[in-house]
Every structure is written in C-alpha cells, then in structure tokens.
Image (cartoon, rainbow, N blue to C red):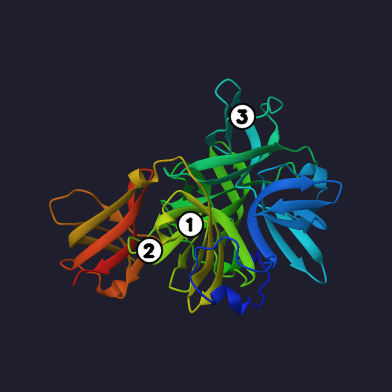
C-alpha cells in the first residue's frame, strides 16, 4: 500500500474539545504530511501553498522522475512529506495520466485512457496526441470532477499511463473502473499483495490499448497508513445518517465523536459533496477525525445518489463466504450490492441472512445500489 505520509506524534491539543472556532488562539503547526491541491506557486521563494500551508519545494517528483517548480500548475493534486533529513518532498498525485484524443475545444471535452471528461478551462494548447496529467475528485455519479489538465513533454514521463478509480465487476483477471474502463490485471503486481475487492479505490499503472487498460502495477488507496501529523483535503462522498462517520474521496472512512473539532462550520454542515480538510488519528482499526475544516460545497446533486431502505432481507448472495448482494422486503426487484466499504454495524456479516430486519444506508454508483452501512433494527 502506498505510504503517503510520515507517522509522527500528534499534538494533544487537537483532541482537547469540540469547537466551532475557526481561529483558535496561538499558531497551529504546519502538518508534516498533506494531501491536497496546489493553491499557489511562488517561484521566487521556491514555495507552494497546499491546504493553506506554505512549503518549500525541495524535491518534486512523479514516479521517480525529478521535476522543476515551473512544471507545476495550480489545482494539481499532490502529496507532501517533510522531514529534517530529506526536507520537503512534493509528489504529484494525478488521477489519470495518458495520451488525449477526441479533443473538442468547443465543448471542452476530451478522452484519456477510455474516459470521456469535461473541463471548462481546457487549454487551447492541448491537442490530440498530447500527454497530460489530470487531477480530479470523485463526482456524485461515480465519474470524475476535473480540477486541472496539465500537458507535459518530458521524455521521462511520456508513456507512464495510469488511472485511479473504484473497482467494480471484479473477476479473476479483469475489473472495471468507474463502471466503464476495462482493466486487465492478469499480469499486474499488486502492491503489498493486497486482495482486490469491489469498492476499493485503486491506482493502476500500465498501458492503454484497444479499449483495454493493461495493468502492470496496482496500489490500493486508502487512509490506513495515514500519519497522525497529517492532513487530507477532499470531498465527502458519503455521510452516515447519525453523523458518526463519513467517507472521504471514495477512499476511506473517518469516525466522528465529541472530541472532533469543527472549523468554519459544524456537524450539520457535514454532507456529501462538501469539501473539507481532515486531521485524524488512528483509533483501533479506524481513523478518528480530530479536526474538520469546511470549504466550498460541490454543485452536484449528491443527495440524488444516496438511498436508505428499511425492512426484511431476502436473496442473500455470497462469494467465498462474503456477502456480495441481497434484496429487501420481497416485493422489490432492486438488488443491493456490498463491497469493501460496506460496514455491518455491531454485528458480523456471518449473521446477515434472509429474514433479518435491517436498515441500509448506501450510495448509487452508475446506477448500482451499494450498501455503505447495515444496521439491525431493534
């Protein structure tokens, strides 16, 4: 699994209390690990600003290739790590990399690795055959909301295709990303020997040919190895009805309790489509959000892609002992799928059988109803 951040001790003051104050007394330390987008580039001081924090750009790299500060652009996704020994490392973290085709500057659309994307700020200089890096966030409909499209001509970067997204339709050799891009992983190396499952967010490297992305390397992306002195920026992609947990960037879940601090908002502002910056600490097998800072709200109608069902379970289907789908209330043809992010609240999926009475919260991804949390009704 990709190690994005340095694990360091978090200040105890972050756990002190629940507050709506956006400017607590005293200066807050700059996180040693940050995942977010570039807000400002200052060539004169060799600094970039990410999530409101300024960092020296000591080392800039993508897949082992060193880059110059003037090759960066605003709204590119990056991961930043700082240490006394190595200085500040800026790692580019694009969602999709490859050659563009079907460029339409009138409609501001283009295709890359089989994905049709729209970007209102698409540069007139980008043409068919150019290699680009696309930074994006998950969209409400399961696709991509493009933040930036950056052309590059470095010979060391051209040919390094990659794509990130949610796994679906997984078989022993193939899966789909965003329910549209076919990936052949039969010859791929899976980082940390992770077991692939539907619903995981993965980074896939390889080549795109004849409508198939041939994977050479796959990395499961989540927040399990997030350092305690780190901050993640992104979009909330699901929120539990009781506001005790939420999902960020379709990658992983954060818990909330009475120690969670809120800046520029409060618990009521925690909704799908909301942009946030999240500090967190490890708590058992979970991550607890210690501070949530609110930013702008996404314009997509996220509530149209959420569901909640209540009733009796039927037609439970399992694969290798793991629940993969079920129906509810007998009279509905709607199949509800489960995946790697489905949580069984205070019970084990072994006990998930036909006839039990449950409440199911979930999201609709490309027309598929996918359970995020299942709780037994009292």
Q: CA distance from mark 1 to mark 3?
A: 42 Å
Dot 2 or dot 1: first in sequence order is 2
Q: Residue furthest front?
A: 25
Mark 2 or 1: in front is: 1
Helix, strand or loop status at disc 2:
loop
- Residue under pointer 2: 243
Q: Is residue 234 visible?
A: yes
Q: Quadrant of residue 217?
A: bottom right
- Mark drawn on residue 101: 3
Dot 1 or dot 3: first in sequence order is 3
Q: Residue 290 at what x, y percent from top left?
A: 53, 70
- Residue under pointer 1: 265
Q: Is residue 333 above or below residue 320?
A: above
Q: What residue appears at the point 27 percent right and 68 percent down from the top-left corner? A: 375
Q: Residue 265 at what x, y percent from top left?
A: 48, 57
Q: Residues within 10 Å of mark 3 (few under 14, many from 20)?
A: some
Q: Residue 362 at what x, y percent from top left?
A: 33, 55
């Amino acid at each position: 699994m990709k190690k994005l951040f340095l694990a360091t001790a978090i200040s105890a003051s972050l756990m002190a209390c629940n507050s709506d104050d956006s400017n607590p007394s005293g200066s807050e330390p700059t996180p040693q690990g940050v995942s977010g987008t570039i807000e400002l580039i200052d060539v004169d001081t060799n600094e970039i600003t990410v999530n409101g924090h300024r960092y020296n750009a000591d080392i800039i790299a993508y897949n082992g290739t060193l880059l110059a500060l003037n090759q960066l652009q605003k709204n590119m996704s990056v991961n930043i790590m700082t240490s006394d020994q190595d200085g500040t490392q800026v790692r580019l973290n694009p969602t999709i990399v490859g050659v563009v085709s079907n460029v339409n500057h009138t409609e501001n659309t283009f295709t890359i690795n089989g994905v049709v994307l729209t970007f209102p700020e698409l540069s007139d200089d980008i043409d068919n055959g150019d290699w680009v890096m696309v930074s994006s966030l998950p969209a409400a409909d399961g696709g991509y909301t493009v933040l930036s499209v950056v052309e590059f001509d470095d010979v060391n970067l051209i040919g390094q295709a990659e794509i990130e997204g949610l796994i679906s339709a997984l078989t022993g050799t193939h899966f789909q990303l965003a329910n549209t891009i076919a990936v052949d992983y039969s010859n791929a190396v899976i980082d940390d020997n992770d077991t692939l499952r539907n619903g995981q967010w993965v980074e896939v490297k390889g080549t795109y040919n004849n409508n198939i992305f041939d994977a050479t390397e796959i990395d499961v992306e989540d927040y399990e190895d997030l350092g305690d002195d780190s901050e993640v920026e992104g979009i909330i992609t699901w929120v539990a009805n009781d506001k005790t947990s939420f999902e960020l960037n379709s990658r992983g879940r954060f818990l909330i309790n009475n120690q969670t601090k809120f800046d520029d908002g409060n618990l009521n502002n925690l909704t799908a489509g909301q942009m946030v910056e999240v500090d967190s600490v490890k708590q058992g097998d979970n991550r607890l959000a210690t501070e949530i800072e609110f930013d702008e709200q996404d314009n997509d109608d996220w509530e149209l892609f959420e569901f909640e069902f209540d009733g009796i379970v039927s037609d439970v289907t399992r694969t290798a002992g793991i629940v993969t789908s079920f129906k509810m209330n007998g009279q509905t043809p709607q199949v509800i799928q489960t995946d790697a992010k489905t949580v069984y609240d205070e019970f084990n999926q072994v006990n998930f059988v036909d006839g039990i009475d449950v409440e199911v919260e979930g999201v609709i991804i490309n027309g598929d109803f996918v359970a995020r949390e299942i709780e037994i009704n009292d």
